[in-house]
Image (cartoon, rainbow, N blue to C red):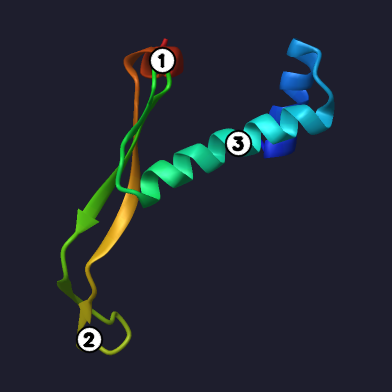
Amino acid sequence: MTTTNEIAEKITTKHGLTKAQSKAVVEAVFAAVTAAATSGAETSIPGFGKFKVKHTPEREARNPATGATIKVAAAKKLSFAPAKALKDALNG
């Protein structure tokens, strides 16, 4: 697993920033994606992929322990679709 601190450390090494500056950059990117998602907008990062909000309708489900039918409320979820370049890097 890669953490935000590890990403910030790589930015520090590659771009000559301080660790605090690098961490601020990483956190700003995640804040921008979060802000776009909460407003319902799509975020596209060329060569990496797209973050998009999807709406899931209300549905019925079963409690596996009791078999009782329950209603699952409608919700929003954040989906990620990798760009072709990322897919190629993973499978190439």
The answer to which image quadrant residue 57 occupies is: bottom left
Q: Residue at x 33, y 43 (%)?
A: 79
Q: Residue at x 22, y 86 (%)?
A: 67
Residue neighbourhood size for the residue with mark 1, other residues' Cα within 10 Å, grouped as few (<14), some (14–19), many (≥20): few
Q: Residue at x 20, y 59 (%)?
A: 56
Q: Residue 17: x percent and y percent?
A: 80, 19
Q: Residue at x 77, y 26 (%)?
A: 9
Q: Residue 61: x percent and y percent?
A: 20, 75
Q: Nearer the viewer, mark 3 or mark 2?
A: 3
Alpha-carbon span between mark 3 and mark 2: 45 Å
- Give the mark nearer the N terminus: 3 vs 1: 3
**Residue type indicated by callout 1:** Gly
The residue beneath circle 1 is 47
The residue beneath circle 2 is 67
Query: Is 53 on the left-hand or right-hand side of 20?
Result: left
**Residue type indicated by callout 3:** Ala
Label 3 sits on a secondary structure element that is helix
Alpha-carbon span between mark 3 and mark 1: 19 Å
Seen in the picture, residue 41 relative to 46 is either above or below; the reply is below
